[in-house]
Image (cartoon, rainbow, N blue to C red):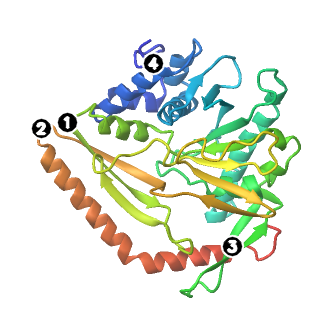
Amino acid sequence: MELFAPLAPAEKLHKSFQFIRESPSHEASRALLQEVFAFLPDPDGNFALDFQTTGFDARIWELYLTALFFNLGLDVTRPEDRPDFLVERDGTRIWIEATTANPTQERTTPSSQVYDHWSEQEEIAIKLGSALFSKMKKEYWKLSHVNGLPLVLAIADFHSADPMRSSSAGLERYIYGLHVRLTGNPSDLESSYELQTIQKHTLGNKSIPAGFFQQPNAEHISAVLFSNAGTVAKFNRMGLLAGKAPNVKALRFGLAYSPDPDAVMPEPFWYVIGDRQERWAEEAIVFHNPIALHPVPEGFFGDAIEVFSSEGDYYHKLSGFHPLTSLTQTLIAENGDIAALDYLLRLQAHTWLLKIQEKQSDMEKEVRAIHAQWPAGPEQP
């Protein structure tokens, strides 16, 4: 089936679908999305229509997961109508159920409340937490074909239209019910951290209990898989890397995990597509459930970041380059002068990096000040 042949009237087509279908800068993403769709095991008959209309975000998340799993060398099938995927490696089989946090018409924050960093983190926790809890209530582990096997919930955050995709921090706080507090005066150069227990997440008139893996029946959920790269930008970059649009150049810039465990700030990065071999899994994070009845083996999802928790503490296992959040700028060589585009993008990147470096000290102080705003005790307002 042709994924980009319209199946609905123009007024019903999703604006993102319309954009990538018509934009010359997205030739690579169109080609790669069609290619991955061909590998999607047994898509239901409404997949293409959903992708073009009301289900664009959820469907592109499924396409991202398909690309991720295949590129990790997993055997990917859909032998049942639910959960969404059965993946296998070296005799280990794991069920994957995909879900997304979607936008609401109005923000949860009342108009009288200032919308700050922690309000945003609470909103992320509530939106993603509600989506995960709704999936857990489906009790897939009671299905005969799921019983006895690991079950992973794969979630993406589409609740905000902001192109600078949110990192996993808000989700991580919700899943383990722990807040990492940066201690010390905002003007100090030294940094230290302490963990605080979170009892609930509250924003406006909405409140949910913190600690997804502490909820009833959570032992049946083996892990939560998250990525903020289930996006058109990811498909466009990977398509360009595969040479699917030779007259297009793109720049990626953003923030990545710092190799320094005591770093206050993530590291800025940039590269022109083609400078390095981008990986499908480099934004993926696996949150392991410490009480899972059927744990996911360590390393099953390749070089994705893995998070483990034990006795009120938790740690990350990662190596290499892992972006936290990024933007992608794409330009088309109308006259075929790719070299000129390459030079322009690199000049813009260097200018951006210099500005970030100039502001580094002030940004660190701002981060410390933000952390100081969080209450010192385990209870939140």
Distance of label 1 from label 4 (alpha carbons): 25 Å
Judge whether residue 116 can be spotted in this image.
no
Query: Residue 247: which numbered mark, if any?
Result: 1
- Residue at image coords 64%, 38%: 154
Instruction: Characterize the local packing of mark 1: few (<14), some (14-19) or many (20 or more) Cα atoms within 10 angstroms.
Output: some
Give the mark toward the camera: 1 or 4.
4
Q: Is residue 249 visible?
A: yes
Question: Dot 3 corresponds to which residue?
Answer: 181
Please report whichever mark, 3 or 2, sits nearer to the chain's N-terminal start.
3
User: Where 190 sits versus 177, above or below?
Assistant: below
Q: Is residue 160 above or below residue 378?
A: above
* Marks 2 and 1, the one that precedes in the sequence: 1
Pick whichever, 273 or 8, lies toward us. 273
N-terminal-most mark, 3 or 1: 3
Asked whether the residues under the numbered discs 2 and 1 touch, taking CB atoms below 8 Å apart as contact, a structural biologist would say: yes
Q: Residues within 10 Å of mark 4 (few under 14, many from 20)?
A: some
Q: Position of residue 121 (x, y in %)?
A: 65, 58
Alpha-carbon distance for marks 2 and 1?
6 Å
Q: Nearer the viewer, residue 87 or 37?
A: 87
Q: Residue at x 62, y 29 (%)?
A: 88
- Circle 4 is placed at which residue position? 38
The three-letter code of the residue at mark 2 reads Gly
The quadrant holding residue 150 is top right
Please state, as top left, top right, bottom left or bottom right, where the N terminus lies in the image: top left
Left or right placement of residue 126 versus residue 340 in this view: right
Q: What residue lies at 40% left-to-right and 15% top-to-bottom?
A: 5
